Image (tube, grey):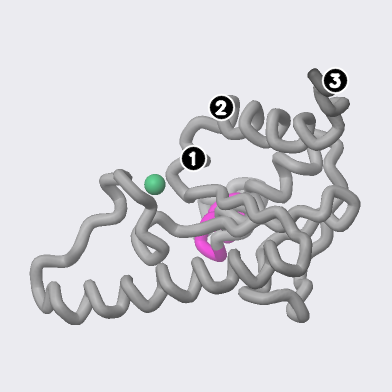
Amino acid sequence: MDTISPEKRSWTMAQVKGRDTKPELIVRGLLHRLGLRFRVQRKDLPGKPDIVLPKHKTVIFVHGCFWHRHPGCKRASTPADNAGYWQAKFARTVARDAAHQIALEQLGWRVLVVWECELRDMETLAQRLVDAFHALHRPAPPAA
Ligand SMILES: [Zn+2]
């Protein structure tokens, strides 16, 4: 006997598959709502940025706080077991991220990082993105 409605089941399956719950997809949805045009899958760029906004010459990385070591974030804890192993692994990831950022900036791209934990407060994140893109179009201050 099946007591789960089709609607409920499809919702459940979406949760199981993680569809629309991946941080990257949430950020894409937010950009879309903000009217910002973007592309994905630009594998030719250093670090394969998650989201690329060619018009704004900006790339966005959506980083997990744990793996990418969000500074000061409690999600960026270090497992007590094999701490040395983890620290070496984390150091490599952070160094790689930094190298990608420098390479992108040298190619003329602006790099934004959205941290996974920021998705808990979508209003603040939306405001941060609005500010980031609005600033690009603000006229330069008059020369003194
Ligand atoms: Zn974080």
Query: From where the camera sits, is residue 14 visible?
Result: no
Q: Nearer the viewer, mark 3 or mark 2?
A: 3
Q: Which mark is residue 142?
A: 3
**In this picture, is 81 found above or below 50?**
below
Please state if 65 lies on the left or on the right of 15 as rendered.
Answer: left
Q: Is residue 94 above or below residue 7?
A: below
- Classify mark 1: residues with Cα within 10 Å, few (<14), some (14-19) or many (20+): some
Q: Main secondary structure of the magenta part?
A: helix
Q: Nearer the viewer, mark 3 or mark 1?
A: 3
Q: In the image, is the residue at mark 1 within 8 Å of ligand 1 by its beta carbon?
A: yes
Label 3 SS: loop
Dot 1 amino acid type: Glu
Give the side of residue 116 with respect to residue 50, left or right. Answer: left
Coordinates of residue 32 in the picture (x, y in percent):
80, 42
- Respond yes or no on whether mark 3 lies under 8 Å from ligand 1: no
Q: Is residue 73 left or right of residue 44?
A: left
Determine the CA span between mark 3 and mark 1.
Answer: 35 Å
Return the disc, 2 or 1, that comes first in the chain's sequence: 1
Report x, y in % for residue 77.
23, 56
The quarter of the picture where the C terminus appears is top right
Q: Which residue position holds label 1?
A: 118
Q: Does label 3 or label 2 sit earlier along the sequence?
A: 2
Report the amino acid beneath label 3. Pro
* Separation (CA) of disc 2 from disc 1: 8 Å
Local SS, label 1:
helix
Q: Is residue 43 visible?
A: yes
Instruction: Identify the disc placed on residue 136.
Output: none
Query: Residue placed at 57% from the left, 52% from the top?
Result: 113
Magenta stretch, residue numbers: 9-17
Q: Are marks 2 and 1 in contact (CB under 8 Å)?
A: yes
